[in-house]
Amino acid sequence: MKNKKRVIKLLLLFIMVQFLISGLFYPRILAVEKGEYVVESRGDLLPYPFSRGSAVWVEDSIYIFGGRNETDMLDRIMKYTPSANKLEFLTTKLPTVLMGSTAVYNGKYVYIFGGKDYDKFYDSILRFDPASETIVNMTAHLPNPTVGGAAAWDGSNIYFFGGSWGGILPQKFDSILRYDTKRDNITIMNSTLTYGRSGLAATVVGQDIYVIGGSDGSNYSAEIFKYLPENDELIILPAKLPTGRKHIQAEFHIGPSTVSEHLRDLEFS
């Protein structure tokens, strides 16, 4: 039972840490000590209050794409290195100002899905190379212009969950998409979320993807799903968040040798 509680706490802890890093219009970076669940301020490193950028961990650094401050949307790419407590702006920029996008790292490239600027919602897929610090626009597109989706890399493909579009007739998507990075194509899966939502989180653990929270525009979800890519199967887990939440991100950081064992515990907590 202790292990079960610890897994849930660890998962929720990283959800909240990623949420705090993403902004709430504070120019502060927070770090967490995993063993003690202690949040430590790294100081006001951001040059302005900041929110709604997408972020990924690459090797020893965190890359942050776009977002907005209190007055403007941004096209900047920031790189934060925790070991040196150093924040830098890359000379490479996004093709446009962009907020509400979704970023995921596949071990070589960062893929950035959707987002919006002042006037337009995007269905684009961008590929950023951390090694060369270059960015290209892929040929494939999302089925709809989308903000606030969640994505995870399972070792073979990227899976994209939900999101929303704020056009003339606003929509929340319940779709699950598979993006093949080698062939640069999108497949709409048969499984769907229980209802359309945005502001949700997704993270890979072992061979499975855990999808968490989100909002349909009126209500915040506390649901936790397990998605099995091999079978295209979505399972609703009995475990829930303490409260419904949106605009969250999740990372799972338990060593490879213990990850499967602990996640089995989560299903029955």
Image (tube, helix red, strand yellow):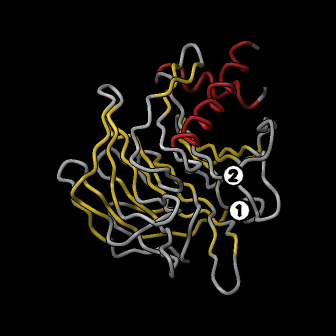
Which quadrant of the figure contains the C terminus? Answer: top right
SS category of the residue bearing label 1: loop
Q: Residues within 10 Å of mark 2 (few under 14, many from 20)?
A: many
Question: Residue placed at 62% from the left, 75% from the top?
Answer: 165
Side of 226 where 85 appears, left or right? left
Residue 158 lies, in percent from the top left, at: 46, 55
Q: Which mark is residue 197?
A: 1
The residue at the far left in this view is 132
Residue 97 lies, in percent from the top left, at: 40, 69
User: What is the spatial separation of the Cα atoms under label 2 and label 1, in whole angstroms?
Assistant: 9 Å
The amino acid pointed to by label 2 is: Lys
- The residue mark sitting in front, 2 or 1, is 2
Q: Is residue 185 above or below residue 255?
A: below
Front-most of 115 and 107? 115
Kindly indicate whether the residue at mark 1 contacts the one at mark 2 (C-beta within 8 angstroms).
Answer: yes
Q: Residues within 10 Å of mark 1 (few under 14, many from 20)?
A: many
Question: Residue placed at 36% from the left, 46% from the top?
Answer: 63
Front-most of 91 and 190? 91
Which quadrant of the figure contains the N terminus? Answer: top right
Residue 215 lies, in percent from the top left, at: 74, 58
Question: Residue placed at 54% from the left, 32% from the top?
Answer: 252
SS category of the residue bearing label 2: loop
Question: Residue placed at 63% from the left, 31% from the top?
Answer: 11
- Disc 2 marks which residue? 246
User: Considering only order in the chain, which callout, 1 or 2, is on the residue closer to the N terminus?
Assistant: 1
The amino acid pointed to by label 1 is: Arg
Front-most of 251 and 67? 67
Front-most of 257 and 247? 247
Side of 76 where 91 appears, left or right? left
